[in-house]
Amino acid sequence: MFVLMGGWKLEVGKMALYVMFPVALFHYFNQPEYFEEWVVKTKRELYPPESKEKRESFEKAIRAIREEQELALLTKLEDAQK
């Protein structure tokens, strides 16, 4: 004779737990207010805000390199015309 240990109510309860546990975790961990502060802090560490002085020095270096390249190109063109 076959005897059920918990009955259908226990099986329905277990099935509800099996389905609701992952859904509840998904819902909990996809709330932006739980990790928004961490994301903003990490983003600021990886990509700090630009300072005006750094930007100006970067643009100055680019201009200097371009001037050197233009000068080298002009000297090559002058040598080629001779």
Image (cartoon, rainbow, N blue to C red):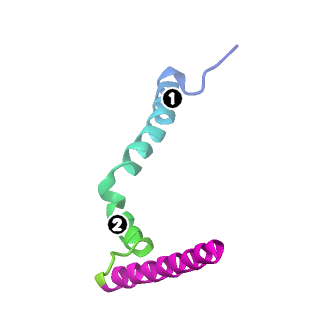
Mark identifier at residue 40: 2
- Name the residue: 34% across, 66% down: 40
Q: Position of residue 15 (x, y in %)?
A: 51, 29
Q: Which mark is residue 73?
A: none
What type of secondary structure mainly makes up the magenta span?
helix
Residue 12 percent coordinates (x, y): 48, 25
Amino acid type indicated by mark 1: Met
Mark 1 lies on residue: 15
Residue closest to the eye, 7 or 58: 58
Name the residue at 37% across, 75% down. Answer: 48
Q: Residue furthest right?
A: 1
Q: Identify the secondary structure beneath mark 1.
A: helix
Q: Which residues are magenta?
A: 53-82
Name above or below for residue 18 compared with residue 73.
Answer: above
Of mark 1 and mark 2, the one earlier in the sequence is 1
Q: Residue at x 51, y 32 (%)?
A: 14
Examine the structure image and report whether residue 80 is included in the region drawn in magenta.
Answer: yes
| Secondary element at image label 2 | helix
- Graded by Cα atoms within 10 Å as few (under 14), some (14 to 19) or many (20 or more), the crowding at tag 2 reads few
Residue type at mark 2?
A: Val
Q: Is residue 28 left or right of residue 77?
A: left
Residues at marks 1 and 2, CA–CA distance in whole angstroms = 39 Å
Q: Residues within 10 Å of mark 1 (few under 14, many from 20)?
A: few
Residue 82 located left or right of residue 40: right
Q: Compare residues 16 and 4 and report the one nearer the observer.
A: 16
- Quadrant of the frame with the C terminus: bottom right
Going 50% across and 80% down the picture, which residue do you hit?
Answer: 65
